[in-house]
Image: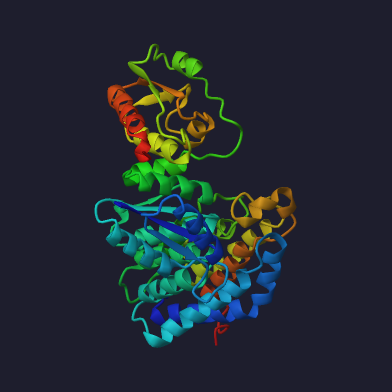
Amino acid sequence: MRLGVDWAVQWLTLSARLMSEHREELIALDRAIGDSDHGENMDRGFQAVMEKLAQTPPETPGAALKLAAMALMSKVGGAAGPLYGTAYLRAATALGESAEIDAAALAGALTAARDGIVARGKAALGDKTMVDAWSPAVEAADEVLVAGGDAVAVLAAAAEAAEVGAVTTDPLVARKGRASYLGERSAGHRDPGAASSALLLRAAATAAGFPEGAAE
Amino acid sequence: MTVALVVVSHSRKIAEGAVELAAQMAPDVRFYAVGGTDDGRIGTDLERTIAAFEAGLAEASGDGVVVLTDLGSAVMTAESAVEFCSEPDRVLLADAPLVEGLVAAAVATQGGAAAASVKAAAESIRFGPEPTFDPAESARSQGRGQPAESDEFELINPMGMHARPAAKIAGGLAGLDVEATVNGVDGTSIMELMSLAVGQGGKLRIEAWGKDASKAVNYVRRLVEQGFGEI
């Protein structure tokens, strides 16, 4: 199965819905170890993405992700802006102008997104950041790809691994970002960026129809 | 001025306040304060940061833009803005404490330093443990022995050594291929030079090693003889 621009638009639309639904939860996570604006920032950023989508409907998945990148970078305000913006932009570049993408292209785009986050934020696995959700997601996606899975299976594996990855940040001591100022006190709380990353990757899988019909 | 300075902060008040403070010591320097989001919240704003870079690039026609930032995501926004702006090679991000680094950069810019030297002036400010710079030890460990060039000058400007002369000395020496000490401290460190607290009539002894040793000594001689432009 190949994914087209409809999937990308649906992904962003579901992302906006999830960011709105989980706004308070993300604010609460960020209040514990950050500056309590992550939920508000992500909600505002994805509302801006929806406005841009309505103004200039994209024609390819890559164009949709590039549009989202620019809106997030300009409107989020916090660290998540440049981080997710860079991720979506690198993914868009990896996808190029293809109208439809297969499992390999998708796994490549996820890797490019993760690498963009690492390059921008200079965080490593275990630093209690969104990298702790994205890195296992990329690894899981690659495994499914090698095993012959299709695009939907790749996204499903990535979403699952990101959720597990986000949970693994609970006991970690933050080494990057605002939470790192708290030192040991940051342990015992989930990283808000890893939590929002898991939601966004879940939206990607749902938009592709996993589980079947869930996107309807 | 050939260099324009941009401040990217999470807070409009911090950006504008830091600029207000630095501008006192650098009346001719063009500053751009980018703080907060476009709707007045705490945060950083990519579009306004890019706009400030472009305005600064147009202003600093001869050289470039030096950028000071506050917390992590301001750095990330500034890095993103560099990638998007028209001339990324002419925008330099300084890794320095915002207020002190901006003052050092402003004074260096006011003194006519090039962008790379302005960045170096900002980055010469470092917090943390007191520097344990021992020139004799440093000379021994690096095996550089006797200085290639040295000289001693009497300060004639009424205010002696303070932030502006220190920034001029440090900024200039940072741009040369030289290792230099002034009265035994690192000649490229504004903070260490200021800490010398040499007044009018006091002496500066410069010792220099490396290819540009004589240039370095002549540079400091000229600054001292001109009273750092203050007389």
Is the residue A154 above or below the residue A124 in the image?
A: below
Residue B48 falls in which quadrant of the image?
A: bottom left
Q: Nearer the viewer, residue A201 or A36?
A: A36
Q: Residue furthest left?
A: B62
Q: Nearer the viewer, residue B191 or A92?
A: B191
Q: Quadrant of the C terminus of chain A?
A: bottom right
Is the residue B177 above or below the residue B231 in the image?
A: above
Residue B31 falls in which quadrant of the image?
A: bottom left
Question: In screen coordinates, is B93 left or right of A164?
Answer: left
Q: Residue at x 57, y 66 (%)?
A: A197
Is the residue B113 above or below the residue A27 in the image?
A: above
Q: Quadrant of the N terminus of chain A?
A: bottom left
**Place of residue A99 in the rendered image (x, y in percent of width and height, measured from the top left):** 33, 77
Give the color scheme: rainbow, by chain, secondary structure or one colour.
Answer: rainbow
User: Is residue A117 in sight in this rendering?
Assistant: no
**Place of residue B84 in the rendered image (x, y in percent of width and height, measured from the top left):** 34, 63
Q: How many marks?
A: 0
Q: Nearer the viewer, residue A87 or A141?
A: A87
Question: In screen coordinates, is B229 left or right of A209?
Answer: left
Q: Residue at x 51, y 54 (%)?
A: B21
Question: In screen coordinates, is B48 left or right of A17?
Answer: left
Q: Residue at x 48, y 37 (%)?
A: B162
User: Is residue A13 in sight in this rendering?
Assistant: yes
Q: Residue at x 43, y 29 (%)?
A: B187
Q: Nearer the viewer, residue B179 or A215?
A: B179
**Place of residue A141 in the rendered image (x, y in percent of width and height, measured from the top left):** 50, 62
**Place of residue B25 in the rendered image (x, y in percent of width and height, measured from the top left):** 45, 49
